[in-house]
């Protein structure tokens, strides 16, 4: 019987806590109405859905950005251990940068970086 009383007390406390949080949110919320004009497009009204389709060239730009983002993610730890690895580590990093450079040249040649 004591276990049932303990379980009922815990359930009652959890329910009271959740109800209190909902009540506090309702009382202390700043604005209950959705924003009509978003900061997107400098305050102009949104004319398209958030998950609308993008032009295909943005995918190439995104991949180039991710490539350079990964470059930085690999170069920071490399900078910490380059003194320990010696010339082998330098050659490997320049090989990695060479592969990225080939990718950028290819994207540039294909016109993925043109904005017009």
Image (spheres, rainbow, N blue to C red):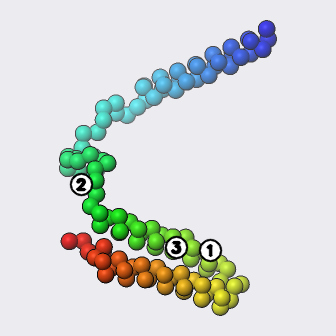
Q: Residues within 10 Å of mark 3 (few under 14, many from 20)?
A: few
Residue 72 is marked as 3
Horizontally, residue 22 falls left or right of residue 64, namely: right
Name above or below for residue 76 compared with residue 15: below
Residue 106 coordinates in the image, percent (x, y): 37, 80
- Going from N to C along the chain, the mark reached first, 3 or 1, is 3
Residue 104 coordinates in the image, percent (x, y): 39, 79
Name above or below for residue 105 compared with residue 29: below
**Quadrant of the image containing the N terminus:** top right
Horizontally, residue 71 falls left or right of residue 10, namely: left
Residue 77 is marked as 1
Q: Secondary structure at mark 2?
A: helix
Q: Tell me how far mark 2 sits from mark 1, CA to CA.
A: 39 Å
* Residue linked to disc 2: 42
Q: Nearer the viewer, mark 2 or mark 1?
A: 1
Instruction: State if disc 1 and disc 2 touch (CB < 8 Å).
Output: no
Residue 116 is marked as none
Q: Secondary structure at mark 1?
A: helix
Name above or below for residue 88 compared with residue 24: below
Q: Nearer the viewer, residue 87 or 34?
A: 87
């Amino acid at each position: 019987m004591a276990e049932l009383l303990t379980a009922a007390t815990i359930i009652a406390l959890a329910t009271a806590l959740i109800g209190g949080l909902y009540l506090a949110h309702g009382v202390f919320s700043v604005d209950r109405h959705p924003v009509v004009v978003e900061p997107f497009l400098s305050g102009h009204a949104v004319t398209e859905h958030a998950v609308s389709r993008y032009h295909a060239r943005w995918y190439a730009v995104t991949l180039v950005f991710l490539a350079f983002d990964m470059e930085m993610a690999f170069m920071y730890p490399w900078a910490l251990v380059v003194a320990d690895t010696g010339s082998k580590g330098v050659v490997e990093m320049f090989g990695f940068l060479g592969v990225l450079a080939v990718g950028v040249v290819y994207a540039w040649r294909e016109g993925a970086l043109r904005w017009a």
